[in-house]
Amino acid sequence: MGASSDPNQDGSDEQQKRSEIYTYEAPWHIYAMNWSVRRDKKYRLAIASLLEQYPNRVEIVQLDDSNGEIRSDENLSFDHPYPPTKTIFIPDRECQKPDLLATSSDFLRLWRIHDDRVELKTLLNNNKNSEFCGPLTSFDWNEAETRRIGTSSIDTTCTIWDIEREAVDTQLIAHDKEVYDIAWGGVGVFASVSADGSVRVFDLRDKEHSTIIYESSEPDTPLVRLGWNKQDPRYMATIIMDSAKVVVLDIRFPTLPVVELQRHQASVNAIAWAPHSSCHICTAGDDSQALIWDLSSMGQPVEGGLDPILAYTAGAEIEQLQWSSSQPDWVAIAFSTKLQILRV
């Protein structure tokens, strides 16, 4: 499980401490990944395998600040059915709730993390009548109301769970085709993207209606990822399947992108809004690049299009990207079997 701090591997301790990049090599291809939010668990992440078999693995790893090594705790590694499509730690910065990790694959599962073990706390299955389930493509944990988790499924639905009651709050048919991602924009408002090419916003106070914020211009172009700007909820960003551009939307002006980010050389796989700034976003893709953009000039035309303010090139296609909300100087990326955390 080699972990190293680049680029000063044989440098002094002082240099290592100041290293801007730390790398962890997993024993398998990494897909799902997430930062812990808790104040008492700095530099902790969960990573999950992408193996074409039923048993998969989840590891909880942590950077040791004193020596620059990212270490996996054997006691906190566990088997998982199918590869998790997403994993999220409970958004509980003040450590007032049990230390939980959620994962999505065939079902939504909640795992309780103890000092020396991880145990399955709850398996949330909304399809009691059938042994088959529409696999979950993604989910989001509501930061303002931590009882609520919203899941998206290939069966065209989104389901809102109350995890304290372990019961469904709401299930709605959200789109005409598979739903690929979901994001909360407030206590009772969420948005989703789908293979039908649309971004839709839902308000739990009026479940019969949704607002279409954007539809991709070419027919049959699925939207695969959605990021809602937590610092300025007027803005969201979405990715078109197999496209090198990122579309940024202002929900006050539906249908027309505010800006399109077009500096990637291959498909974009992940987007993350800055947790501490309303106008910065990070994007990553199959060109092995992670790009950070300053969108403060959004809305004014920029000759030739917007350029990123920072670029980092990884060793392979970047499939996953997460910006730490509790330590906003750090972004994590996953490519092939490597997890890297980068100081920005």
Image (cartoon, rainbow, N blue to C red):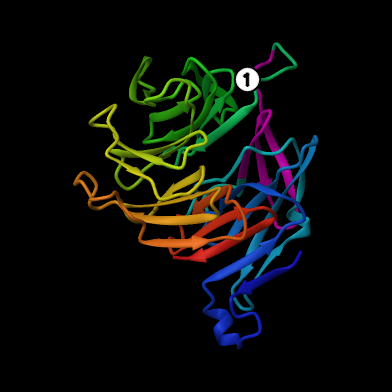
As drawn, the residue found furthest toward the left would be 300
At 54% from the left and 57% from the top, the residue drawn is: 332
At 21% from the left and 44% from the top, the residue drawn is: 299
Q: Main secondary structure of the magenta part?
A: strand
Percent from the top left, x then y, of residue 310?
A: 40, 62
Amino acid beneath label 1: Asn
Percent from the top left, x then y, of residue 257?
A: 30, 35
Between residue 286 and residue 139, name the one nearer to us. Answer: 286
- Placement of 5 over or under 39, stated as above or below: below
At 59% from the left and 68% from the top, the residue drawn is: 22
As drawn, the residue found furthest toward the bottom would be 12
Quadrant of the image containing the N terminus: bottom right
Between residue 113 and residue 173, name the one nearer to us. Answer: 173
As drawn, the residue found furthest toward the front would be 304
Quadrant of the image containing the C terminus: bottom left
Residue 111 part of the magenta-drawn span: yes
- Dividing the picture into quadrants, the one containing residue 276 is bottom left
Between residue 112 and residue 180, name the one nearer to us. Answer: 180
**Disc 1 designates what residue?**
126
User: How many marks do you count on the picture?
Assistant: 1
- Placement of 50 over or under 335, stated as above or below: above
- Placement of 173 over or under 253, stated as above or below: above
Q: Is residue 94 visible?
A: no
Mark 1 packing: few (<14 Cα in 10 Å), some, or many (20+)? some
> At numbered mark 1, what does the secondary structure look like: helix, strand or loop?
loop
At 29% from the left and 44% from the top, the residue drawn is: 232
Residue 1 part of the magenta-drawn span: no
Percent from the top left, x then y, of residue 318?
A: 57, 51
Percent from the top left, x then y, of residue 244?
A: 46, 42
- Dividing the picture into quadrants, the one containing residue 21 is bottom right
What is the magenta range? 101-128
